[in-house]
Amino acid sequence: MSQVISAADLIHTLNQQGVELYMDQGTLKARSRKGRLTPEVVELIKAHKPQLQAHLTATGGSALQRPPITAVPRTGAPIPLSYAQQRLWFIDQLSGGSAHYNIPGALRVQGRFDDQVAEQALQRIVDRHEPLRTVFRQRGDVAEQVIRTQVTLQLQRRDLSTLSAAEQQQAVRAAVNADALEAFDLQQDLLLRARFLRLGEDDGVLLFTMHHIVSDGWSMGVLIDEFVTHYDSLLAGQPDPLPPLTVQYADYAQWQRDYLQGDVLDQQLAFWQETLADLPAVHSLPLDFPRPEQPGQEGGHVVITVDAEVTPGSAPTGTCATGHPVHAAARRPDTVAVPSQPQP
């Protein structure tokens, strides 16, 4: 007589062995640590497929149940950093504060532009998004985020209209670089800076800079979209058109800390420790110069055009997530590095 096992027990057993089952658009799928999805495990899953599908569908589609993200009451109690924020906080403290994780953006503004209205639009964004009003403090051995109730954003202004076109171009380039390289103080600064460079009566450049600990590339797009929405509504004398956010990033950080612990954390750590066990400490790309003891952030930009006749016989290359070519020497089977974003 074969042993009767429930779908829940089988899922738990497989999780303990490093195999996770989940539903993807009505299809039962599995992911596992290297070597754990053996033919015997596959046959076991197939033998109980209907029960597993029914159980996972009824429980939300994942063997590792993820509770929903809900708003945490703002009682003044410490709010933890997310793991991504903790990493960035550590790097910032280790380096003594740097601009390495600044995220700059710029808008060329042509036509009638009211910088006073622009400042009000940016203030609405700061009021709506808690991360921009958040500062980070060390309490003993633990870092925490402190959300300030109200912070005033001041749009910095600089008039370049009296300069020649060539001088304006040089001044704008210098201002963009200077703003991107100005470090934030994560313990006290508003983590959004905005500057307006006036080039003429109907021409200018609007600069934005945020820190990666509260933002990412996607967030810059959100910032610009919301800025345009608020700017237009303020010009029209309309009330704020955007509803309050139901959850903020601090809610995600608390959810992540509550969820990633115990068996869930152990399984994920074990998966990556095994997957990356053989990864070399240093990449195998050939270097032009000796590797410095302290890494720097300065670099150059070299453009090379390769004839079509050359490429078929050249060493194979791939393309990474940022669009830069990756030489075959840097590759490792089944391991791909991509940029990460700390937003939920």
Image (spheres, rainbow, N blue to C red):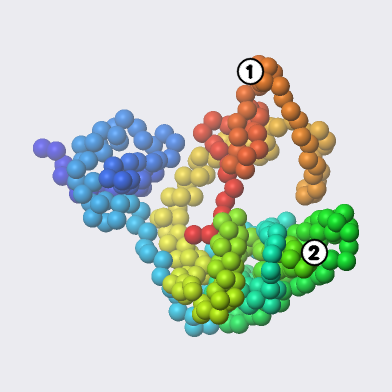
Q: Report the residue marked by disc 2.
A: 199
Q: Position of residue 153 (x, y in %)?
A: 68, 77
Residue type highlighted by circle 2: Leu
Q: Report the residue marked by disc 1.
A: 312
Left or right: 142 with respect to 207? left
Q: Nearer the viewer, residue 121 or 261?
A: 121
Q: Position of residue 132 (x, y in %)?
A: 61, 71
Residue drawn at (63%, 28%), measured in percent from left and top? 317
Quadrant in which the N terminus is drawn: top left
Q: Are marks 2 and 1 in contact (CB under 8 Å)?
A: no
Residue drawn at (84%, 66%), measured in percent from left and top? 161
Q: Is residue 26 above or below residue 161?
A: above
Residue 231 occupies which quadrant of the picture? bottom right
Q: Position of residue 91 (x, y in %)?
A: 69, 59
Residue drawn at (56%, 56%), measured in percent from left and top? 218
For the residues labelled 2 and 1, the Cα–Cα distance comes to 48 Å
Residue type highlighted by circle 1: Pro
Query: Tag 2, which secondary structure?
Result: strand
Residue 90 seen by the camera: no
Query: Tag 1, which secondary structure?
Result: helix
